[in-house]
Amino acid sequence: MQYNFIKDNLSGFSVEEMCECFGLSRSGYYDWSRRSPSARSLEDEKFKIRIKALQKKAKGRFGHRLIYQYLQDEQAGCGRDRTLRIMKQSGILGVQSKGFKPQSTDSNHQFGYSPNLLKQLGKPERCDQVWVADTTYLRTESGWAYLATVMDLFSRRIIGWSASSHNDSTLTCHALQAAVLTRGGQIPSGLIQHSDRGSTYASYSYQRMLSSLKIEQSMSAKGNCYDNAAMESFYGRYKTSSVRDLVFANEDQARSNAFEYIELFYNRFRKHSSIDYKSPVQFEDEKNSPMGEVPASLPACIHNN
């Protein structure tokens, strides 16, 4: 491994400097460099090229476990430990997640609250049985922009989203409207939509929209963000891998960033362990959702101007 490091860093350091650092002889390095590569080394090189291509497509967001799953799809014959070793030796590192840190919502408002229906339901067994919704914030040079999303809890697909400079019920209503359009405008009976107790979800206008669509509302218990853990986890990964410390120039740039992550990466490319290591769109296609939804090529977004 030390000889490989020396070989990969010849542009920045001399052989003499690196051998002295590692306590190696130059003759030993040159003897190693003249050897014909083994069949396994040649195979490792092919895997390295493929891993770099996958990581480039994912914009550096994957760790070795996800890379391994994509290689499995290709029947490449590269095990998980080997994938990790090649990535470490080649310096192919993914973004490290900071983990799930739930944020409490300020629920001090004039509106009422709905009961938590998810406790009685358990894990969803089909699409369009439970939708979960939440809102997060994105920093721009002129202030905050806000992103509201709706996720199908069964497939983990973001089926509706909207971005705006105003964190109000118009934003959350637009995200819900986008979800309905993604599902072809048809809502099955008994659909539950779960959120936190924030004012934008408890507002009269949002309540009226849910009622007109015959969607039952469910809300997390006070101070318990784990009731909406799937959505909180989605935002955590989004912030870690695509936003981090970015300050967007304006609302449009923040919206473009959300579009790339949700529509091009998360929904259609990123595999999820909770859905058999498939992307949400792939998982829904294989489950043959009966809703007659809009083609997956269309974005699940409504602008909130």
Image (cartoon, rainbow, N blue to C red):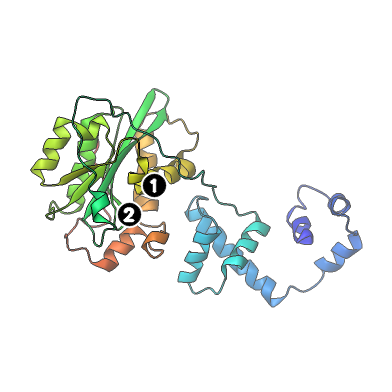
- The alpha-carbon separation of the residues under discs 2 and 1 comes to 9 Å
> Mark on residue 263?
none
The residue lying toward the viewer, choosing from 183 and 49, is 183
- Label 1: few (<14), some (14–19) or many (≥20) C-alpha neighbours in 10 Å: some
Q: Amino acid at mark 1?
A: Phe
Q: Residue at x 85, y 62 (%)?
A: 29
Q: Residue at x 51, y 43 (%)?
A: 98
Where does label 2 land, which residue?
A: 156
The residue drawn where x is 88% and y is 58% is: 24
8 vs 231, nearest the viewer: 231
Q: Residue furthest bottom?
A: 39
In the image, taking residue 142 as reference, residue 121 lies left or right, namely left
Q: Position of residue 77 (x, y in %)?
A: 55, 75
For the point 17% across and 63% down, the residue is 290
Q: State the quadrant of the N terminus.
A: bottom right
The location of residue 22, given as percent across then percent down, is 84, 54
x and y, in percent, of residue 12 in the image: 77, 47
Residue 5 placement: quadrant = bottom right
**Mark earlier in primary sequence (2, 1):** 2
- Can residue 220 be seen in the rendering of this structure? yes
**Res 279 quadrant in image:** bottom left
Please report contact status of discs 2 and 1: CB closer than 8 Å, yes or no: yes
Q: Where does the image place residue 191, in percent across and percent down from the top left?
A: 17, 52
Looking at this view, name the residue that lies furthest to the top.
Answer: 142
Q: How many marks?
A: 2
Identify the image quadrant of the C terminus.
top left
Q: Secondary structure at mark 1?
A: helix
Q: Which residue bears the numbered disc 1?
A: 234
Mark 2 secondary-structure assignment: loop
Q: Is residue 237 above or below residue 103?
A: below
